Image (cartoon, helix red, strand yellow):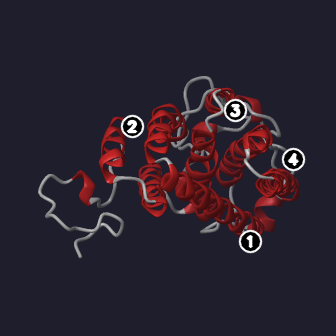
Amino acid sequence: MQTTAKTQATCHAAPRTPNTAARAQRHGKDQRYFDLMAYIVSNTISGEIMAVENYSEMVPLMPTTDAKIETVKQAVEESKHIKMLASLGKRLDYAVKTEIVEPQWQKIRDHFSAAVKKRDLPACLIIQDLMTETMAIVLYKTLGRDTDPDTAQVAGLILADEIEHLGIGARRIKAMLEEDPDTVHDALVWAHHRVMPELFSMISTSCHSLCAELSVDCGGIGLDSIATDIELLRVDALDAYMETLDLVGFDAKVTMPLIASMSSYGVQPQADLRLRTDAAPGCSTGAGRCC
């Protein structure tokens, strides 16, 4: 899910391959675009790999056989996404990594595993089905706009699955909130402070090592080649996260300080009455406006 416009000094220009000109002519895109796609798709594959591992690890915690089967199905769907994305890179002649490279993904995996060890199912669901899936939805929507036809088609197919996974997670967490709201809200706070900084750090203008692994000219690529930019993507991601919290029905008294704390990530929501001290009583927070 990480995107980049610039990189740190560790990212170096790559030698151009002989088929660069032919590829550009076939797809109507320049080298900057394909470098960007190699980077985004590789990071997206990392997220899908993490999702497979998360869902697989979570299966024993599920309370019923049907829930276990549903979770296994989610893991299988994520594994299909890995193959679809790898195939996309092959068709468009750019290299992708089918392993986790950037450290943020591994940190999120570690936090998820910690929740599993605590047998904290609400935290597991919040991390994978709510937080990670919300960010994935933002990314696949972005890849479905102003990209080549192959990328847009693949993004649309995967997006449908990720929206379904978010719906599954929302349904599960809603049921848990009705039974034990204090425990679920505690899980949200725990997961938020560990996972959201990692997710948002991957919507940035720098990378750790993936660009070097891919041998792409990270300094020459930019989100402008798909008609967006870092700040817009970060605002979209934050707004989508707030919508997810509202969809589930978390208490605004809990979510308000969590959203406010995200200003330290360098991003502000487009509009949210929960962050306004002058909001009138009775205002609707979910729609971002007063009734």
Circle 1 is placed at which residue position? 149
Q: Nearer the viewer, mark 2 or mark 3?
A: 2
Q: Which amino acid, mark 4?
A: Pro
Q: Residue 81: tell me if it is visible.
A: yes
Q: Residues within 10 Å of mark 4 (few under 14, many from 20)?
A: few
Counting residues from the N terminus, which is met first, the one under dot 1 or under dot 2? 1
Circle 2 is placed at which residue position? 265
Kindly indicate the quadrant of the structure image that contains residue 115.
top right
> Which secondary structure, mark 2?
helix
Q: Which amino acid, mark 1?
A: Pro
Q: Which amino acid, mark 2?
A: Tyr
Q: Residues within 10 Å of mark 1 (few under 14, many from 20)?
A: few
Circle 3 is placed at which residue position? 210
Marks 1,4: beta carbons within 8 A:
no
Q: Which amino acid, mark 3?
A: Leu
In space, the residues marked 2 and 3 are separated at their CA atoms by 22 Å
Image x and y of residue 269, in percent:
34, 54
Q: Nearer the viewer, mark 1 or mark 2?
A: 2
On screen, residue 256 above or below 285: above
> Which secondary structure, mark 3?
helix
- In the image, 70: left or right of 187? right
Q: Residues within 10 Å of mark 3 (few under 14, many from 20)?
A: many
> Which secondary structure, mark 1?
helix
In space, the residues marked 4 and 2 are separated at their CA atoms by 41 Å
Circle 4 is placed at which residue position? 18
